[in-house]
Amino acid sequence: MFKTILAAVDGSDTGGRALKAAIDLAIKDKAKLYIVHVHLHGRPVEELERMAEIEHLVPELTGYEMPTAVRGTAMTRELLAHAAHEARVASELGDLVLRRARQQAKEAGVETVDTFSASGDYADGILDAIDETGADLVVMGRRGLGKIRQMLLGSVSNKVVQNAGCAVLLIQ
């Protein structure tokens, strides 16, 4: 029986299945549910917008036009504005993912739900959340990157499994 469950969500279908499993376990065990989202900082805005469209998260973000490419020397102000927009898009997407996840948990009947976000390395953010919440179970999706990319970059789920001080449930 688990007392504190941490669900790591990212807005993907796999993350949604992981959230559903965490909700079901939290209801069954009358456990406290924490939901964490690690922001997608460092990803190109086009990729964030594509994710927003595919996941039907924020359709209004698709109207943003990327700054025109600057020939020769880049203007610092334009680069800073682009970086600020990228961070804002990532933050808004993360906040929306968390709001929807919290609402889903509450509507399903989870009594105690808390959400929070982190930024930086995905696995480190989840591992920090485990420490902060005292979770005795982490539920997260496993996307399965492909063997070569996984060997080169590592896997978030593998890093969490290897370093978590609690049980980890991976959802495929």
Image: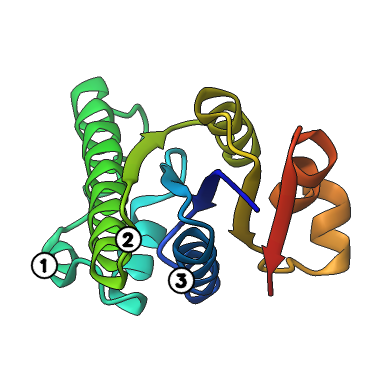
**129 or 72: nearer the viewer:** 129
Residue 107 image position (x, y, % from top left): 23, 69
Check residue 51 in the rendering and tell me which mark sits there, or answer none.
none
Q: Tag 3, which secondary structure?
A: helix
- Residue that carries the numbered disc 2 in the rendered image: 101
Q: Are marks 2 and 3 in contact (CB under 8 Å)?
A: no
Work out how far the residue at label 2 is from the one at label 3, CA to CA, in angstroms: 8 Å
Residue that mark 3 sits on: 16
Is the residue 40 above or below the residue 100 in the image?
Answer: above
Cα–Cα span, label 1 and label 2: 20 Å
Horizontal side of 62 relative to 165 (left or right) equals left
In the rendered view, tell whether residue 96 sits above or below residue 90.
Answer: below
Marks 1 and 3, how far apart at CA: 22 Å
Please tell me which of labels 2 and 3 falls first in the chain. Answer: 3
Residues under numbered marks 1 and 2 in contact, where contact means CB atoms less than 8 Å apart: no
Q: Quadrant of residue 164?
A: top right
Q: Residue at x 80, y 69 (%)?
A: 146
Q: Residues within 10 Å of mark 2 (few under 14, many from 20)?
A: many
Q: Amino acid at mark 3?
A: Gly
Query: Which of the two residues, 61 or 68, is positioned nearer the viewer here?
Result: 61
Look at the numbered disc 2 and give the secondary structure of its residue: helix
Q: Secondary structure at mark 1?
A: helix
Task: Classify 10 Å Cα crowding around label 1: few (below 14), some (14-19), many (20 and above).
Answer: few
Q: Which residue is mark 1?
A: 60
Amino acid type shown at disc 1: Glu
Q: Is residue 25 above or below residue 156?
A: below
Residue 94 x/y as whole percent: 32, 49
Q: Residue at x 53, y 58 (%)?
A: 29
Q: Amino acid at mark 2?
A: Ala
